[in-house]
């Protein structure tokens, strides 16, 4: 007796629940800088910093999600709430991807298995466990792709979903050529009007509201800095495009095209070979699917090309920008497997998913759950017990957000005090106001810092094993 397939909605809901429970079974203690910074802003209800110019919506969504938890009695730190939010977003994205594949003509089982493969791919899985902005945009990008590939796409709804992706992160603007291609492929440019209209309005209104009610810029320069976002992170807030020479950018981008499936970098011997093989196999299947030159294959190739134009030029070595590429590559991979019998296709997806799950769990997810593998967190915990409660603490890198968030101490961000005279002047101002200043032994490893502080006054105050804490105070 032939088994009846589930309705698409029921299957989508089941995938969402299964992937969400799978995500919630793991915990990341990697604590990236942006995630902790967002958690700080959420706890302070600091909307000026929640509505980041490059990813307007995530902070506000996170704040709302956090408030819901508080209503039900949660009293812990917001970083956990944001991590759960990303697990929800990652699970929803995987579920929508399965629905998208059904609309592309894939069978129910194959769509479910491809969604599982997406869920355990390195970039998708890891950033579904971390507090970070990119899964929100990826979810809405998947919704836009699903709608545009429907039998009768609704251009205005495509625009709304695409706007949600852009509000998740402005980089998703690069999906526009692919979406326009499908909407106008029958040489009917009028189909573009409702799409572009809804897209423009749905992006403009939140930005205008955020600018008026949260940012409230007092000058054009304030407005410019807000909109530039990550492109104005220099110490003097000048514009800086995060690029590297093309001779280095292209290899970095190509390498990251593999690493989004499995993190083989840092592995050795058979582990490295297994990681590379697992990354190459879906790419080979995707290349086979791209060769079909169907409407769907051209759409996904334009999708990849659009994002590549931006992210070869902007931080090609940063994995989070490549999360949405997994949607295109796995969709193309399922197309590339069509020449195989149904059981062979399903068997291949099951085998890859099982192997990738084991690999990424062993080398990425479980290590990230061990606090000992996060030296910044170890340093923060040490600071909490070795520096007085109201002390100022010199910090660099993630320490600039770890110190206030995990230790409730006030940081002096060394990024802004690279000059020795400026650093000494800041220390004089603090000590002159009766404030105590401390620095950990690990922070002293920053190049040149120990010498600057020894010339000022550096006094050991606590030690435990390889951990040390120093009081920074002028010699009398």
Image (spheres, grey):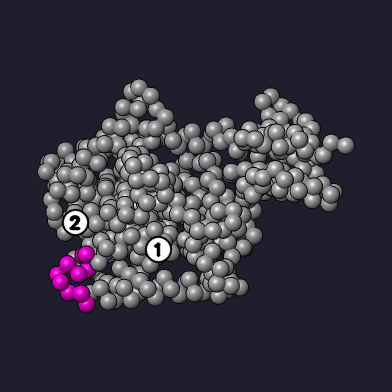
Who comes first in sequence, dot 1 or dot 2?
1
Q: Quadrant of residue 270?
A: top left
Taking the image as shown, residue 441 lies to the left or right of residue 163, namely right
Q: Which residues are magenta?
A: 181-190
Quadrant placement of the C terminus: top right
- Residue 420, position as x, y percentages in the image: 70, 43
Q: Residue 71, can we see it? A: no
Give SS at disc 2.
helix
* Residue at 47% across, 61% down: 54
The numbered disc on residue 87 is none
Taking the image as shown, residue 345 lies to the left or right of residue 427, namely left
- Residue 231, position as x, y percentages in the image: 48, 57
* Residue at 54% across, 44% down: 31
Taking the image as shown, residue 345 lies to the left or right of residue 276, namely left
Give SS at disc 1.
helix
For residue 87, above or below residue 64 = above
Q: Rounded to the nearest whole Å, what is the CA distance between mark 1 and mark 2? A: 22 Å
Mark 1 lies on residue: 166
Mark 2 lies on residue: 298
| Depth order, front residue of 240/380 | 240
Q: Residue 427, can we see it? A: yes
- Residue 320, position as x, y percentages in the image: 42, 48
- Residue 204, position as x, y percentages in the image: 43, 73
| Depth order, front residue of 144/186 | 186
Residue 474 located within the stretch drawn in magenta: no
Near mark 1 (Cα within 10 A), the count class, few <14, some 14-19 or many ≥20, is: many
Residue 183 located within the stretch drawn in magenta: yes
For residue 341, above or below residue 305 = above
For residue 56, above or below residue 118 = below
């Amino acid at each position: 007796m032939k088994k009846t397939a589930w309705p698409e909605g029921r299957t989508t809901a089941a995938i969402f629940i299964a992937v969400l429970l799978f995500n919630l079974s793991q915990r990341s203690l990697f604590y990236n800088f942006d995630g902790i910074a967002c958690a700080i802003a959420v706890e302070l209800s600091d909307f000026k910093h929640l509505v980041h110019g490059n990813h307007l919506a995530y902070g506000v969504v996170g704040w709302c999600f956090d408030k819901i938890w508080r209503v039900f009695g949660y009293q812990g730190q917001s970083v956990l709430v944001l991590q759960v939010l990303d697990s929800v977003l990652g699970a929803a994205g995987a579920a929508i991807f399965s629905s998208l594949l059904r609309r592309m003509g894939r069978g129910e089982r194959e769509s479910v298995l491809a969604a599982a493969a997406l869920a355990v791919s390195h970039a998708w899985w890891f950033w579904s466990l971390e507090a970070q902005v990119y899964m929100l945009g990826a979810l809405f990008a998947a919704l836009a792709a699903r709608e545009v590939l429907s039998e009768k796409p609704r251009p205005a709804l495509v625009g709304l979903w695409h706007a949600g992706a852009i509000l998740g992160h402005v980089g998703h603007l690069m999906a526009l050529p692919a979406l326009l291609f499908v909407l106008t492929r029958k040489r009917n440019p009028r189909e573009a009007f409702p799409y572009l209209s809804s897209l423009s309005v749905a992006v403009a209104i939140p930005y205008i509201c955020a600018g008026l009610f949260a940012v409230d810029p007092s000058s054009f320069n304030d407005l410019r800095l807000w909109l530039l976002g990550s492109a104005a992170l220099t110490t003097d807030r000048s514009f800086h495009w995060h690029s590297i020479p093309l001779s280095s950018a292209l290899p970095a981008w190509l390498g990251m095209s593999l690493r989004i499936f499995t993190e083989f970098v840092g592995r050795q011997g058979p582990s490295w070979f297994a990681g590379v093989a697992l990354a190459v196999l879906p790419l080979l299947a995707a290349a086979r699917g791209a060769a079909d030159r169907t409407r769907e294959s051209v759409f996904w190739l334009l999708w990849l090309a659009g994002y590549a134009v931006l992210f070869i030029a902007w931080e090609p070595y940063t994995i989070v920008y490549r999360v949405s590429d997994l949607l295109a590559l796995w969709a193309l991979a399922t197309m590339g497997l069509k020449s195989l019998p149904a059981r062979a296709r399903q068997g291949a997806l099951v085998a890859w998913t099982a192997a990738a799950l084991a690999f990424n769990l062993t080398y990425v997810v479980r290590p990230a759950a061990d606090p000992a593998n996060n030296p910044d967190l170890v340093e923060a915990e040490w600071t909490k017990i070795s520096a007085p409660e109201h002390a100022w603490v010199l910090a660099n890198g993630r320490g600039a957000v770890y110190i206030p968030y995990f230790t409730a101490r006030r940081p002096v961000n060394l990024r802004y005090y690279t000059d020795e005279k400026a650093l000494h002047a800041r220390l004089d101002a603090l000590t002159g106001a009766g404030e105590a200043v401390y620095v950990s032994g690990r922070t002293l490893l920053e190049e040149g810092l120990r010498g600057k502080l020894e010339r000022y006054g550096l006094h050991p105050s606590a030690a435990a094993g390889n951990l040390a804490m120093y009081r920074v105070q002028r010699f009398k």
